[in-house]
Amino acid sequence: MSRIKPESRNILNFIRDILSRLEMTPQELVAIGERIYGQRWKTPFAQSIGLSRETISRMAHGHRPIARQVETAARLLDQNVNAAKYKERRFGAKGESVTLRKGENWAHLIHCNSVEYIPSLDGSIHAIVTDPVWPKALDCLAGSDNPYQLLTDVLRKLPESLDIKQIVIHLRCDGDPRILCAIPHCFPFLRFAWLPYAVPSPQGRLLISGDVAYIFGTPPKAANGKRLLPGHPHPDYCPHAKPSKGSTNHPCSRSLEHVEWMIEKFTEPGSTVLDPFMGSGTTGLAALRRGRNFIGMEIDPNFYREAVNRLREG
């Protein structure tokens, strides 16, 4: 049997070393993705190579080996200086609106870009209760490219003539609270409230066990049975939220019971509640059930139509 010469052995070791360096790490994949497409890189990258976003996400978090074809595609895209940046979908929201009535209360729903429509609001709006687009939100949601700027633009364009007393921001427990820096300083922080789930669900290493509400502004007037502002719903009054079973088509719908509790505890009876990111209309439905008026804005035509139908039937 012929022996491998020392020179050949050195060459083989050199090749093995080069090949080991070519194996992409999750950190490298993330860095290349963000360099090409920005922070919301997973969806456009997955689309460009014909894989699902979930597959790319598992590779980026180290839960799955990075396939050779993914590595090759990433390196080729990284070399292409003309790679197109991902652009958020835009909707042709023209300001279509509908007004619905339930007893003495009303709901006015508007299909619009809230950043553009907010300055035209007039009359009295007493509270904002909303679940805004949050950092690391799903790419399919309008505004997910820069949630902090979106919330900042909406709140800073509120007309001074509005009589807003409270702002309630509703986030999931893993929602980045740094988005709250968008709240104007004229609304002092009041408290947070914990909104538990009946059945927590694991997502990666996180156990998603509830939502958090952050309340700013002035407390509603004290009344019998409402002198103290609680930090979580009483189980007899508001059962823990149950996992969504298709009651709406929105990918991030919130518990109706939770939103009803927030409106009941942190807004005035008979007041008008604004939600500039209405989604499928959960806040509006809760407001009507608790004897408040409602103004809701939504840019996605599908969610807007669903909100209209839910409030008509609710």
Image (cartoon, rainbow, N blue to C red):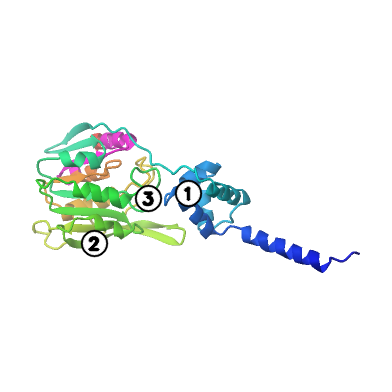
Residue 292 among those drawn in magenta = yes
Determine the image quadrant of residue 216. Answer: bottom left
Left of 262 or right of it: where is 20? right
Q: Position of residue 83 (x, y in %)?
A: 49, 43
- Numbered label attached to residue 137: 3
> Of circles 1 and 2, which is in front?
1
Residue 140 covered by magenta stretch = no
| Residue 254, x across and y down, in percent | 31, 49
SS under mark 1: helix
Mark number displayed over residue 192: 2
Residue occupying the point 46% across, 45% down = 43
Task: List x then y, in percent, for residue 4.
Answer: 84, 65
78 left or right, relative to 240: right
State which tag comes first along the sequence, 1 or 2: 1
Label 3 CA crowd tier, 10 Å (few <14, some 14–19, many 20+): some
- Residue 131 at least partly seen: no
Label 1 crowd (10 A; few <14 / some 14-19 / many >=20): many
Q: Amino acid at mark 2?
A: Phe
State the residue at coordinates (13%, 37%).
103
Q: Position of residue 305 (x, y in %)?
A: 30, 33
* Of callouts 1 and 3, the N-terminal one: 1
* Disc marking residue 161: none
Residue type marked 3: Ala
Q: Amino acid at mark 1?
A: Ile
What segment is highlighted magenta in the picture? 288-310
Provide the residue designation for mark 1: 36
Q: Residue 233 occupies which quadrant of the picture?
A: bottom left
